[in-house]
Image (cartoon, grey):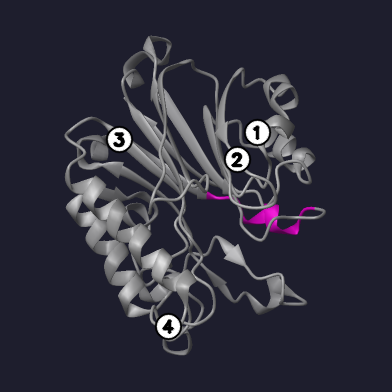
């Protein structure tokens, strides 16, 4: 049996519903996790998404920003939205796959949208950056007590942790998403949770990997100044099942694209 899980910061699910349909048709994952759906619960395009062949959909949203959703071919045995940093800002939802998922039954899938952190990498001067560091600290606490259940963590974690996860390590050391305090926090979180970074497990450094290219670049493909902000991690007990990780970079060139592209990990049992 194979299980494929994709993660994608869609940057408005209603604006890019056609891109979601295309991705589901071309990539066809078993589970798609979306971030930044930017959609209040009462406006979420549930029927359209179910019509694409994914009958099992859960989401938490709010007007204009944030929001996460999980689309699945398999039913869920459990759904757990969770708030972080004493805020109700729709940045995390988790599911447990039901018996219909076969050998993947009982797997937890956690979909995160970590705060971007603003522009100034100083928590004393920038409340957004302080929030980001607090969010990562709470994730670390969660990871340390999560137990030994088979777990998949995905999402826009808004940190490019390694030197070759950005187009220029030296030039971005003082830029939010690649500062040492962020990269160390994310790596500590991953290690304490006993998670495997799927992309880097199969494609170690120094190969460059990017999943995000700024809208500010007039020719993003030629400049290729990307960052790896979108991640799929698996608990170490699933390490032997990892078969592939695909970065669907062509999606950045679709009409009215998100600035992020889908990332898909495939496990085989």
Q: Could you say whether the residue bearing mark 4 is in a helix, strand or loop?
A: helix
Mark 3 lies on residue: 151
Q: Which residue sits at x=75%, y=58%?
A: 253
The disc placed on residue 41 is 1
Contact between labelled residues 1 and 3, with CB atoms less than 8 Å apart: no
Circle nearer the viewer, 3 or 1? 1
Circle nearer the viewer, 4 or 2? 2
Mark 2 lies on residue: 61
Q: Position of residue 58 (x, y in %)?
A: 55, 27
Q: Earlier in the sequence, mark 3 or mark 1?
A: 1
Q: What's the distance in space between the residues labelled 4 and 3, CA to CA?
A: 31 Å
Q: Position of residue 194 (x, y in %)?
A: 19, 48
Mark 4 lies on residue: 169
Contact between labelled residues 1 and 2, with CB atoms less than 8 Å apart: yes
Q: Residue furthest front?
A: 86
Q: Could you say whether the residue bearing mark 3 is in a helix, strand or loop?
A: strand
Q: Quadrant of the C terminus?
A: top left
Q: What's the distance in space between the residues labelled 3 and 1, CA to CA?
A: 26 Å
The residue stretch that appears in magenta: 247-254
Q: Is residue 107 a member of the stretch shown in magenta?
A: no
Q: Earlier in the sequence, mark 4 or mark 2?
A: 2
């Amino acid at each position: 049996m194979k299980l494929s899980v994709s993660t994608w910061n869609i940057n408005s699910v209603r604006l890019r519903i056609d891109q979601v349909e295309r991705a589901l048709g071309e990539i066809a994952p078993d589970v798609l996790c979306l971030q930044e759906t930017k959609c209040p619960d009462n406006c979420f395009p549930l029927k359209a998404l179910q019509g694409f062949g994914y009958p099992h959909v859960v989401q938490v949203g709010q007007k204009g920003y944030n929001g996460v959703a999980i689309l699945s071919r398999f039913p869920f045995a459990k759904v757990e939205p969770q708030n972080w940093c004493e805020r109700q800002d729709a940045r995390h939802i988790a599911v447990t796959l039901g018996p219909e998922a076969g050998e993947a039954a009982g797997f937890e899938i956690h979909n995160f949208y970590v705060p971007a952190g603003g522009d100034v990498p100083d928590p004393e001067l920038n409340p957004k950056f302080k929030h980001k560091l607090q969010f990562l600290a709470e994730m670390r606490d969660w990871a340390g007590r999560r137990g030994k259940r088979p777990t998949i963590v995905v999402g826009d974690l808004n940190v490019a942790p390694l030197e070759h996860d950005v187009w220029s390590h030296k030039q971005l050391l003082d830029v939010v998403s690649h500062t040492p305090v962020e990269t160390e926090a994310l790596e500590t979180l991953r290690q304490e949770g006993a998670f495997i970074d799927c992309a880097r497990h199969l494609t170690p450094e120094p190969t460059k990997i990017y999943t995000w290219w700024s809208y500010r670049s007039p020719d993003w493909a030629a400049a290729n100044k990307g960052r790896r902000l979108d991640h799929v991690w698996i608990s170490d007990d699933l390490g032997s099942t990892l078969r592939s990780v695909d970065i669907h970079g062509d999606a950045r060139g679709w009409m009215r694209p998100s600035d992020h592209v889908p990332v898909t990990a495939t496990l085989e049992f």
